[in-house]
Amino acid sequence: MARSQAIRFTFAIASGDNAGLGAGQFRVWCHGDDTYIADAGVPQWKTSLHGEIAWRTAETAESHSSPEARLPGETDRAPWKYTPPDFVDGQRLAFVVGATRAALAPWSVPERYQRIEVRDRWDELTKANIWMTQADAEVPDHPFRIGPILELASGTRVWASVGREYLEPIDPEPAPTSTMLEPQIPGVHDVTAPGVLIRGVHLPGRSTDANWSQLLRRVVEWSTSTSTAPTASRSASRRTRVTGHVPNAGRTACPSRPTSRTLAFGSRSSAQTTV
């Protein structure tokens, strides 16, 4: 059976002493009028953009009903819900995946994933911007487009481009033990489109299942209390831009650490657990 058409990408340093460091293994695909975004390193979670109605990031039904569920059984498995951004001149920035330099570690992914180059510097956010273009509008001839142009049943096209934004510089850090994805929500954070930031995580010793279970429990508890946050990269304390280039919309900054109104979910991959 032929593989369905999808946009596939990863973030990686392409040259220099740190070539080969990377993060993320994302796939964007469409079915009917729905768009899906998922990281193969986090199979328990998926972002679903259902038409113009229900946009959310959720634990999958299979994971939520399993003994290894990431959220308590009585908890809504879609803790992050979004309002679809408005179209402007037939275009809208639907979702953003951002990677900080501090999230990169030794990394290997299949060749079918397009490499988005992360420049080896500590003052820049590298982004995959997921766009939607209405049926009666032209898809822009973007110079940094990645992957194929997908089409929804309504005729709306879904496509992706690379973006970069300046960050307040930080000192270089060791490669993280692993990563976690931090949701960004319009109305909660100062962003114009929903998305996730890939953050480096530093756990004591080796990243074992026990380590991760403890971290995930702390994250869930932290989301509803004022308890101490899990240890993320120091870059998580900086203010980060994730707006992308939206027509007639300003570039605004957002707090890069989660607040009591957000919750970061863990990513664990064998390629990243030992540094």
Image: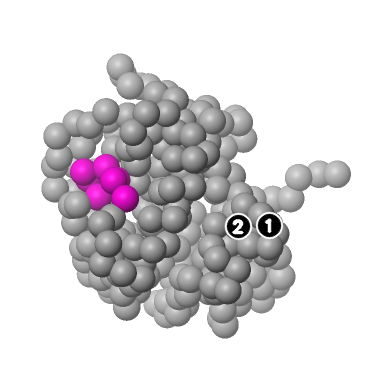
* Residue at left offset 36%, top offset 66%: 223
Q: Which mark is residue 66?
A: 1
* Residue at left offset 81%, top offset 44%: 2
- 111 relative to 224, above or below: above
- 3 relative to 45, above or below: above
- The local secondary structure at tag 1 comes to loop
49 and 268: which is toward the camera: 268
Residue pointed to by mark 2: 69
Q: Amino acid at mark 2?
A: Ala
Q: Residues in magenta?
A: 230-236
x, y percentage for residue 140?
46, 60
- Is 147 left, or right, of 222 in this rendering? right
Label 2 Cα crowd, 10 Å radius (few <14 / some 14-19 / many 20+):
some
Q: Give the CA separation, mark 1 to mark 2.
A: 5 Å
**Is the C-beta separation of discs 1 and 2 under 8 Å?**
yes
- The local secondary structure at tag 2 comes to loop
